[in-house]
Image (cartoon, helix red, strand yellow):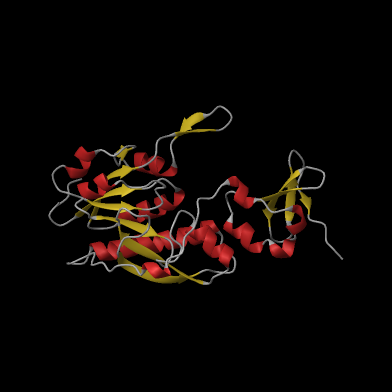
Amino acid sequence: MHYNYAMTKQVVFFGSSEFSVVVLEKLLSAEGCVLRAVVTTPDQPVGRHLKLTPNPVKAFAQKHNIPVLTSMNYELITMNHQPIGLVAAYGKIIPQSVIDAFGEKIYNIHPSFLPKYRGPSPLQQQILDGITETGVTIIKLDSAVDHGPIVAQVKDKILPNDTTQSLGNRLFANGASLFLSQLRKEVPFKAKSQNNSLATYTHKLTRQDGFVPWEQFKPEQLDRQFRAYFPWPGVWTTTPQCQRLKLIALQPHILVQLEGKTPQPWPIQN
């Protein structure tokens, strides 16, 4: 297939998660957008035998014959027609040298209405906080995390049954559409500075974030935690008998699973 590079916009995409694939799918099918390459994280050991396995982005790119890089290859980035960079759920800091290599034409899709909820876990924290108004933001990258000037934003709602997975799929899809709408403008990517005095921050999640003390492990109190920590790290506790117990569903009945045993219904308190 041949492209008219004078009429199309070339994009180098940075991502590593299933949310990144949501964006990639829209870029791949969009007119006027050519995916030059995908930059993602190296294969990781998975399963009992620790087999090296590509992440969802690399698997998607290979399936569609998109060049894949697992390190910053400046030759590809800067050769011939300088592309636009787009970052979505990459999980790593983009160094200033790469920002400079793009001539500062590198952008990030962030699943919150910045400057609120900067950092690595905005989806989870918004659900935990019980807010109902959210959005997705495209920023121009700078050297600080989620700090760059805002290119575009669109609002959205957090639904009562949203999990991190469903909310992320929707916001990243909206972010991809928003990026493409900017890409098609004659003078795209006009940016305005964020109001840093309004910024809030999230932290990187660990398995321990899903732990709920036994005395607080009550069905009526777990809704936000379960939805925020689905699918990872999940909500779990330790019983007074030192058994690990994991919450695996909320509807129609809350179920729990003891390690090595069949799931049992949560006992109904009269």
- Residue 120 location in percent, x, y? 46, 53
State whether residue 35 appears in this view: no
The answer to whether 136 appears left or right of 126 in the picture is left
Lateral position of residue 267 relative to residue 23, left or right: right
State the residue lying farthest toward the right: 270
Please tell me which residue is depicted at 58% across the width and 63% down the height of the picture.
128
Which residue shows up at 79% across the image and 54% down it? 265
Q: Is residue 214 visible?
A: yes
Tell me: residue 111, above or below residue 82.
Answer: below
Residue beneath the point at 47% across and 30% down: 52
Q: Residue furthest top?
A: 49
Is residue 84 placed above or below 258 in the rendered structure? below
Residue 67 coordinates in the image, percent (x, y): 29, 39
- Foreground pick, 124 / 196: 196
Q: Position of residue 163 (x, y in %)?
A: 56, 60
Q: Which of the 4 image quadrants contains residue 191? A: bottom left
Q: Quadrant of the C terminus?
A: bottom right
Q: Picture coordinates of residue 32 (x, y %)? A: 22, 57
Give above or below for 200 relative to 256.
below
Instruction: Name the image quarter holding the N terminus.
Output: top left
Residue at position x 39%, y 64% from top? Answer: 174
Instruction: Please tell me how many numbered marks the rendered image carries.
Output: 0
